[in-house]
Amino acid sequence: MYSDRLRHAGLRGKLMSAAQAAEFFRDGMTVGMSGFTRAGDAKALPAALAERARGEPLRLTLLTGASLGNDSDGLMAEAGLIARRLPFQADATLRRKINDGAVMFIDQHLSETAESLRSGSLAPVDIAVIEAAAIAEDGGIVPTMAVGNSASFVQGAKQVIVELNLAAPAALEGLHDIYLPADRPERAPIPLAGPSQRIGAPRIAVDPERIAAIVVTDSPDSPSTILPPDAETAAIARHVIEFLAGEVECRRLSPRLAPLQAGIGTIANAVLHGLIDSPFSGLTMYSEVLQDSAIALIDSGQLEFASASSITLSKDMHERFLRDIERYRERIVLRPQEISNHPEIVRRLGIIALNTALEFDLYGNVNSTHVGGTHMMNGIGGSGDFARNGQLSLFVSKSVAKGGDISSVVPMVSHVDHTEHDVDVLVTEWGLADLRGLAPRERAPLIIERCAHPEYRPALRAYFAEACRRGGHTPHLLERALCWHERYRTAGSMRES
Amino acid sequence: MYSDRLRHAGLRGKLMSAAQAAEFFRDGMTVGMSGFTRAGDAKALPAALAERARGEPLRLTLLTGASLGNDSDGLMAEAGLIARRLPFQADATLRRKINDGAVMFIDQHLSETAESLRSGSLAPVDIAVIEAAAIAEDGGIVPTMAVGNSASFVQGAKQVIVELNLAAPAALEGLHDIYLPADRPERAPIPLAGPSQRIGAPRIAVDPERIAAIVVTDSPDSPSTILPPDAETAAIARHVIEFLAGEVECRRLSPRLAPLQAGIGTIANAVLHGLIDSPFSGLTMYSEVLQDSAIALIDSGQLEFASASSITLSKDMHERFLRDIERYRERIVLRPQEISNHPEIVRRLGIIALNTALEFDLYGNVNSTHVGGTHMMNGIGGSGDFARNGQLSLFVSKSVAKGGDISSVVPMVSHVDHTEHDVDVLVTEWGLADLRGLAPRERAPLIIERCAHPEYRPALRAYFAEACRRGGHTPHLLERALCWHERYRTAGSMRES
């Protein structure tokens, strides 16, 4: 029974239903689940736990890699199961509970959760729930389409529940490279010098005694929800590619560029898609998540190698990936998110970081998370890991939202996730502002004229001119700095009436 | 003539006056000068260049390690010599010019300037001006009381001018450890596993052909300007030490703690001074600057080893250091600031980072740089290098300023240098708020009750309560979020009248 997938014979006695496995959980526990950007998430336990929570008091602290698929976060939130959630989410129901103050959400840099657990800044994980493609002879767990924080959760958890997903092909074995830094003060340099290097083991090591249950599932990851490129994302892609070509021309970058990181989402995916029509080849990625564009770039021959922590694909692309997995396995490695996002590696490799902004301001500060300065969208994710420590930090956004009622370029952002110190380049469909080496008073005119929607430029120019008259290194009119957001909240548009 | 200090005989012909050396400079050049927190700065060229700038058009882009002593920044700014300045400054005259928009100031993380030069994001250095204690047989430069960016400037500059300072004892040789990361993509891990390890050379290597001039000086560094501990800084120190003792008790830290970083300034110095009366021993520092407190802790036997990029001391402590330099040299190493502040090392060693905030808000965002959100004080310095990548990030501040007219705890900071993601612990004289693992709505009450001045607590409570009624993950009333700052600007006090 599942002998190719469950190769440790002694563990067969641990096979049970999700409902049975859900009985291991107690109110107040800390639970670490696999899953990163809808990939590699546990498919059965979330529903079984939500079911239990509907009938009895059961509230958990839930840690994951990043967002879950299968509406699991929504299901668990709706059932009242989630008391505390970190480090990332992207679910409408859970988001509402977070913004209502019913769920405590801790918005963390994705490289830091494992470190917080290791140092004891977070309570230890009681139970880890990990999706696997197989369990090896020694009990070692073969992850599926994401590694995320799974290795750290397994390392620290008192008990481990494995979801053996038959829909994940056995051929995923060999895709992963599991390496975790040692405890301090004995920690050595991470010996990783390039995206394709392997420094760890293909499986997550675990003492089989700690595996408390094995639940068999057979359901695929949720397909990614990215939208196809449109005229605006195509324009953003053109600006980015033109910028990179310029960097190559003046020899600041090699024709192979530098390892690329791209955040989750439609715009970043579209920019990478745009590289298919670019002059660049011999590219590599060192990113946290691979989307459709990465597979397309491998197929076009331009992307030599991609390192990440998860792969999240559309339905068609997922099928293409699985059909040809042996070939892709030669060009892709999945690592723990602590390593895919590690400051040490990001700085060493000189990553070109491409992330999405909700809004940015005249001086280059970026809001990635809070709508109207108050309401959490998804979370900062890994953007800070890459933007702070990479070689080049680009943020992209469409210049307006809500049919033009919201300008993405504002006098002052309503929440800061990335400070002016960490933002090199801003891009909208209108153009690109290269902020490197510029002081705030030089940044503002460039951002207004290159990135803002023409409709909002006069108001931005007027604000900046008046602020300059008042003075300061970073001129502002504090009494009006956030009035665009306030106008949208009360009048439904940032436009001056 | 100076044969013990100028050991390369062929370079003796390069000896000249500062005025003669100043003739090498041309309008529009980029100049890299030694100097970090008033230590190790060039003493003669700034004045000679200012003199030239008074008589002819001469405007430069000036890079340093950090702040300069001897009023050099003020002298050069006053003369109109400085067109562009980075990455840090702390001079009243220059500050005024920056805030008037007359000098373009680029406020950079101190670990990043060398990387920006290497990658070509900044224009290359035309002339490096480096203070030295000696020039070796091979032309190698022995720095004085700071390394800063000197090695990077020398590496990249077309010409090098050395200021040979006879007031700096020859015995400084051996204090420094010069290591720079290689160009990418051939960069290897930085092989540094502990604060006391040496990985480089004792001198800055340079082809003697590139040394264009040697100017002899004989003046000491400016003494540091820190104030003695007072009742409030002593209370802050007590809270920090109590917190660290608690971490040791629950085994999150060893009794030797972890390598300590402390920002420049009176409060951080006072906290370290407080460690003299603490139970901790076997301590190490991995910091950017050492102040009086580090020397006192070495003398008390509690500080085993200190790594930094500069040493800035009061007059008495400076004399004590020089008297006993052979002994201190066994316990101190000075490194390039790219290494002292490097994300790779800061994360690996698990630094405990202690930095000063100008103000912080209900949710843990920190403003380190901008008075009233607009006017630059000094710059972010290295605080971001340590706060983002360290194991524990503490920010300290007195709860009020200007006789109570300014509250350091505000509804929303007027400028963000450190986001809530990077701030673990906040401390004022009233108490300490441990924010680890807490959501924004949990952080606010803790920060109000532990850190805010009692006079401002009712208004903060009222703001938070009303903001919560409006909702959101991070509740705010945007129309009033910055009104405390506006009230101070227009009415001279943040107090509600």
Image (cartoon, coloured by chain):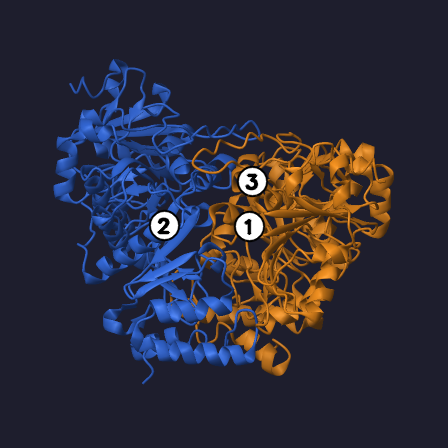
Chain colours: A orange, B blue
Circle 1 sits on which residue?
Answer: A113
Q: Amino acid at mark 3?
A: Val
Q: Are marks 1 and 3 on the same chain?
A: yes
Q: Quadrant of the N terminus of chain A?
A: top right
Q: Is residue A416 left or right of residue B48?
A: right
Nearest to N terminus: mark 1 or mark 3: 1
**Residue at the extreme bottom:** B497
Residue B269's x, y, as percent? 25, 50
Element carrying mark 3: helix
Q: Amino acid at mark 2?
A: Glu
Q: Is residue A403 above or below residue A9?
A: below
Q: Amino acid at mark 1?
A: Thr
Q: Is residue A249 above or below residue A55?
A: above
Separation of residues labelled 2 and 3 (CA atoms):
34 Å
Circle 2 sits on which residue?
Answer: B249
Does the rendering let one see residue A274? no
